[in-house]
Image (cartoon, rainbow, N blue to C red):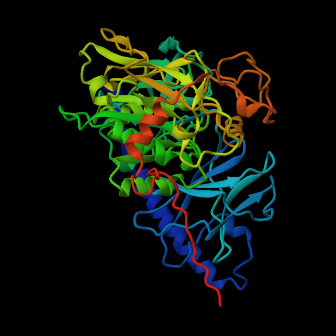
Amino acid sequence: MKHREEENQIVQILDDHSDRHERSKKTKHHICCSLEQRTLRPRLVSSWRTLALKSISSDSPFVTVQQTVLFPDQALIFLKYPQASPPFTKDDIDCVYFSPNSSHPHPNLQPDSIDWEDPDVQIVRCPLQPSGVTASIGIKSNGHLLPIGPTYRWDSLAYEALIDWDNTTIVFVKGLNLPPKIVVDPSRFECMYGLDFTTSKLLLQAEVISIGQEIVRCKTPLSILSGSRNVNSSVKVSVRGVGKPILSSVARPDHRLDPNPPSQKKHQMCVCTMLRNQAQFLREWVVYHARMGIQRWFIYDNNSDDDTSSLIKSLDDENFNITRHVWPWIKTQEAGFAHCALQARDSCEWVGFIDVDEFLHFPSGLSMHDVVGNVTSNVAELRVNCHSFGPSGLKRVPAKGVTQGYTCRMAAAERHKSIVRPEALNSTLINSVHHFQLASGFEVVSVKGNVLVINHYKYQVWEVFKEKFYRRVAAYVVDWQEEKNLGSMDRTPGLGTKPLEPPDWSTRFCEVVDTGLKDRVAEMFTDPKTQRLPWQKQEKFWLIGTR
């Protein structure tokens, strides 16, 4: 009872803090606007502007830097917007940098890109500067600076959180450095809830129910469960080893999964993937799999700066049931897939975890419905063999798509990928990228190769393949440029650690000519009039007249 009273007191304090914070923002905005009217040189960056902000116009609501997260090549600055506030565009703002103990900024740089995490949180990706330099946002229209927010490192951070069906909080954490595929003794850790982990005030301690890899399941305090979304959007959750410091956090438990999911799921088959800069291949992947029986796509976008966002919107407008989830956290593919499994659980009977260069192929002419529709209820995972295809003699990206261009592969299957029932996963959500641990009582079945295989277009033409050196996303797989685990299956045989094209690259990884999927795609998708496939770029022909 005493503990419950303490929680209620903390929630009341949090409510009061939230109200004061809103009033403070309005007061600061009023002061800022008054000061600006007295400023003779609106482009001058003066000392008071590091403490106050005016938005693009004097009527704009107050915008704050919620936090900054430093990545190896970028600083991600999260801007918090009041409701109905007009957002900045990339052309409205600059990335501004300061050295320690200096109020004079370095030269401004344009943001690499702008994105949205939530309707009221904007992510500005700024080029990373030398160590020790802090970053903020400058507003071009009036020369003002946003106050520098709290800054964290990406590799020691609680970065996402949500409240599950059973009212536990699932926290995704970097920096615990736990071994892969192993459940750790939860009594060695504690979950912490609060506004500010740098002080011992206003902190709630909670039990860790399970912990493994980068996923922690916490017993959520009743005060958090009963708190308003306004309160929970201010509260953060983190983890610490018993007797050790609390990890920094940007994870807020303000998203709650429906505790009463529908009894009938909308979709029989869904797909989760994590990608970066795959726009040129995404349409072929989605259009093909829609015909094969995929009904829903969850795209976790890991900092793309190509046309991925606009392409997904275009596909959605064309009635493909596809959503883009901004997932800026690098080397977190296992955690991202666990997060996706939770998101898909309410609406999907089955979920496949495959990459955009992997295509489900049904050699006997079946569909996804034929495969999963005949599985008994005690089976919760289907394992599908993967065949790795090579460049197939090509030196340029095939114009008709990967399924038409790459037709030569390795003879033996390299590994398998999984299609799972998301509600049958072990509650720890431990996985090794494409393989989850199941709850007790469920079984695994390996699918025969004449029924279903995965064509993995792994070794494409060099201009595509070399990007793999820069976008490894799995937490437990060493980056290819590091001199570690050189014999790992996750590396390309004989390639080394530098993105230098071998002279014979176009003819490598070719042991078996396999045109099975190429032939089926050509038969199913080729337009009889134009002889084009639906994902081919439309060529423009201009009639040039002569006098």
Residue at the extreme bottom = 547
446 or 163, which is in the foreground? 446
112 or 280, which is in the foreground? 280
Query: Residue sitting at 74 percent across and 63 percent down?
Result: 109
In the image, residue 164 sits, relative to residue 209, either above or below, namely: below
Q: Position of residue 124 (x, y in %)?
A: 60, 56
Quarter occupied by the C terminus: bottom right
Query: Residue sitting at 62 percent across and 53 percent down?
Result: 149
Q: Is residue 256 left or right of residue 130?
A: left
Q: Is residue 379 left or right of residue 242?
A: left
In the image, residue 38 sits, relative to residue 226, either above or below, namely: below
Q: Position of residue 496 (x, y in %)?
A: 79, 25
Quarter of the image for residue 120 reads bottom left
270 or 360, which is in the foreground? 360
Quarter of the image for residue 407 reads top right
Q: Is residue 196 left or right of residue 8?
A: right
Q: Position of residue 406 (x, y in %)?
A: 58, 35
